Amino acid sequence: MPVDSKSNELRRILVVDDSAVIRQAINKMLRSEFDLVLAGDGESGWEQLSADNRISVLITDIEMPRLDGYAFICRVRAADDPRIRDIPIITITSAEDEETKARAYACGATDFITKPLNAAQLQARVQAYLGFDRPEAETVATGDDVDELTRLYGRKAFIQQGHRLFPGGGAPVALVHLAVDGFRKLYRQHGDEIADRILVWLGRRLMTFAEQNVLLARIGGAEFAFLLANFGREQAVSLCERIRQSLLESPFADGGLSIPLTVSLGVALPEANIADFDQLMRLADHRLRYAESKGGNQIGVSGLEEFLSPEELVLVAPEDNVLLSTQELEEFAAQTPISASTGDAPVPAELVSVDRALALLKEGRTGVLAPYLDVLVGSLLPLLRFYVLDRGLDPSVLLADLEKLVRRSQN
């Protein structure tokens, strides 16, 4: 039961909805775990929020008289008082269209739930934003274990817990290392205060994914990590994909400011060559950096970076602005690799990029390209066959026609 550690009282939740039925329904769903304060419109909700410094989470409807949910959220996010400005806001509405959802997030909503309400879902969402009080999260309220900005676990405590959960023989623990893409640029563009608000906001968003047996920490500047007890590869990757998609759909919003964010993630699980938790962290970090090197907004899970040379990584890198999905990464990792004729490390044929190969050819790096010619040409055969049939060409003059086509495209 979430209790204020200072006063030993239930955490207080403000519910704002013009429907008395909905207000009472939410009160019934949450009153055993929280202290509820109810208001009938945005103006009344604002008065309650301004006067009561014990309110920890705000739940608001959208369609309301006097001050609707959009204006109410915007007013909260523009408040001078950080207690009000940074409060988690769960938006509840009967509307299911994406426009309503996008507008609520743009105003500054933290989360979004549609009617009819589900008691278990609502309780879980509220608890997530008070997650550092839950036994499952095990986040301590004081001391060096806590990150002062986000109130999540800090790096030291995270590593301690990791060693505890990862005995020498290897335990069913997955580790996810996450970083905000381009955060230094955001910092330079918006300054300290907005950068800090982004990290606090992101920490709260990530807490919604910190269910039972999941530990979340801020382990670096714009870097977070999850410890996933009793998680397999598929579960860990699924969690990463949900986080990635959630941030794509919901940009950071602060008053009139809206900043799209993407993240890169690295996933590591105990493997034969992983002897301790420190090695597991290094593997997750390696996969995170690999995801970042490919343009960000990706999940590093395939392990390709561990056996490919730097030159081969150039070949397998995706085309500019084309991102590999989680499913593709998993499928590629499972492919039977082909070996280069030079005896170098193998590379899955499906990952060879034609654009990268052409770039290498233009640079005169034919030695790197040569082992993959059969694969590259084979991938182009369906296109060449279609070209011949569509143009009614004689295959014997195909090369001559192709050279003319190239010359025309260059003029």
Image (spheres, rainbow, N blue to C red):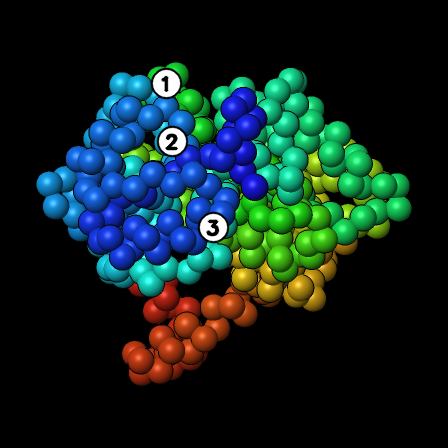
Residue 210 percent location from the top left of the image: 56, 45
Q: What residue occupies the far right of the structure in this picture?
A: 169
Residue contact at pointers 2 and 3, CB within 8 angstroms: no
From the top left corner, tell me how far across and down residue 117 is, in percent: 37, 59
Which residue is at 38% across, 78% downward? 386
Mark 1: which amino acid?
Answer: Glu
- Badge 3 density bin: few <14, some 14–19, many ≥20, Cα 10 Å: some
Residue nearest the observer in this picture, 286 or 76: 76
Q: Which residue is mark 2?
A: 55
Decide which of tag 1 and tag 2 comes sooner along the chain: 2
Q: What amino acid type should be assigned to the residue bearing mark 3? A: Gln
Q: Residue at x 70, y 40 (%)?
A: 283
Residue 20 in percent (x, y) is at 24, 53
Q: Residues within 10 Å of mark 1 (few under 14, many from 20)?
A: few
Q: Is residue 314 left or right of residue 408?
A: right
Q: Estimate the spatial distance between the alpha carbons at disc 1 and disc 2, rounded to whole Å.
A: 23 Å
Q: CA distance from mark 3 to mark 1?
A: 31 Å
What secondary structure is found at the residue carrying circle 2?
strand
What's the residue at 60%, 24% (across, down)? 141
Provide the secondary structure element on which disc 1 rests.
helix
Count residues near mark 2 (Cα–Cα under 10 Å), then give few for <14, some for 14-19, many for 20+.
many
The residue where tag 3 is placed is: 123
**In front here: 328 or 78?**
78
Q: Picture quarter containing residue 329?
A: bottom right
Going from the N terminus, do you reach mark 3 or mark 1 first?
3
Q: Is residue 241 above or below residue 58?
A: below
The quarter of the picture where the N terminus appears is top right
Q: Which residue is mark 1?
A: 193
Relative depth, front residue between 86 and 51: 51
One can see residue 246 in this view = yes
Residue 277, image x, y percentages: 78, 37
Vertical arrangement, residue 321 with respect to residue 188, above or below:
below
